[in-house]
Image (cartoon, rainbow, N blue to C red):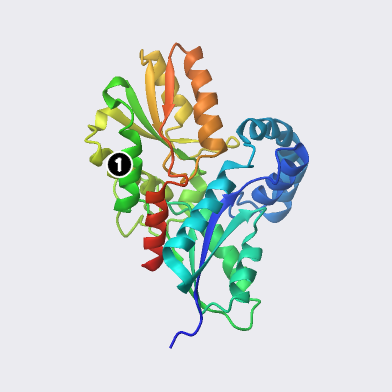
Amino acid sequence: MVFGKKGVLLVNLGTPNSPTRGDVYVYLKEFLTDPRVIDIPWLPRQLLVKGIIAPFRSGSSAKLYQELWTPDGSPIKIYGERVAAGVQELLGDEYVVELGMRYQNPSIESALKKLLAKQVSEITVLALFPQYASATTGSVHDEVMRLLRKEQAIPSLRFINSYYDHAPMIEIFADNARQFDLDSYDHILFSYHGLPQRQLRKADACNHCLKSADCCESISIKNQFCYSAQCYGTTKAIASLLNLPSERYTTCFQSRLGKDPWAQPYTSEIIEKLAHGGAKRLLVFSAAFVADCLETIIEIGTEYQEEFEKMGGEKVDLVPSLNDDPRWIKVVADMVRG
């Protein structure tokens, strides 16, 4: 017999508390010292992040966050709050829905405390990352388990690992693209957040990763938890709904940090290649993100646009993310229900 309500924890990556350099520094420090994000030994990680990356990047990153910021705050937090409220409304009084951010506020810890205070009988954890990666979904699950293991009474836990090809979600991405004249674009990019190749290999228990040029283009039991393979799976699902032939689109990866090889091809290099080939108009999906954020609005919408223009291109259009679309809120509620 179940006595309490059902708890739901929705988690996204996070955001600085404000677009000031100080708050961005605090955010970067917490984010990048996560051992699942920069997966090197503790001491060099601390020295790298606290001594180099956070101090030197916080200023430039703060300027970008200032461009991104709205009167209501950070878009990723605003959309997260709206989605949580909408899911709560759809699920009704039988559920308690809380939003947490992996880094900064509202924290996962504060969200879990609210759920436990309501005496929930079970908790469903849904990380708002369609494709699984140790650095994102894995880190969220790790943090939830770290916090709950301190409790004497631990409710039943359900983790939703990934939903990269979940048909109702794919339909929204495809429908968002239908507002554009797809035939007017020279090429369509599916640009996902990058991940170091070493992290792809670490998630591989079958000696399959990067052993062939097309190892990510289909998913099997060997690479079911491969982030890159799941990204390719998302691309294929959206492209299929839009009837896009394979020569019209490319799966690529953005936001590389450091000199180590990351998942390839790199979005910046694909854009350069297309521009040199005479392309003038590009359409970009960013289907690793369910809410528009720094990596979509600024990196793609502003920075890639500027780079493309310098190379002779004209227009880079961004397909809107899921944000607070009522259809997306319903998809989340349905996934929670199982």
Residue drawn 42% across and 62% down?
A: 90
Residue drawn 62% across and 42% down?
A: 74
Please give the count of numbered marks on the rendered protein.
1
| Residue 67 at x, y percent in the picture | 63, 30
Nearest the camera: 98 or 54? 98
| Image quarter in which the C terminus is found | bottom left
Give left or right: position of 120 versus 227: right
Residue lying at the far bottom in this picture: please name it: 1
Give left or right: position of 243 versus 232: left
Q: Is residue 255 visible?
A: no
Nearest the camera: 30 or 13? 13
| Residue 211 at x, y percent in the picture | 36, 46
Q: Quadrant of residue 224?
A: bottom left
Q: Quadrant of residue 236?
A: top left
Task: Relative to 70, say whether 279 is above or below.
Answer: above
**Residue position for label 1:** 238
Nearest the camera: 208 or 251? 251
| Image quarter in which the N terminus is found | bottom left
Residue drawn 34% across and 28% down?
A: 188
| Residue 13 at x, y percent in the picture | 57, 50
Task: Relative to 1, say whether 83 is above or below.
Answer: above
Give the amino acid type for the residue marked by disc 1 in the picture.
Answer: Ile
Please rate how many residues cluster around mark 1, counting C-alpha atoms within 10 Å: few if below 14, some from 14 to 19, many from 20: many
Residue drawn 73% across and 32% down?
A: 59
Instruction: Assign a secondary structure to mark 1.
Output: helix
Nearest the camera: 211 or 69? 69
| Residue 318 at x, y percent in the picture | 43, 30
Q: Is residue 249 visible?
A: yes
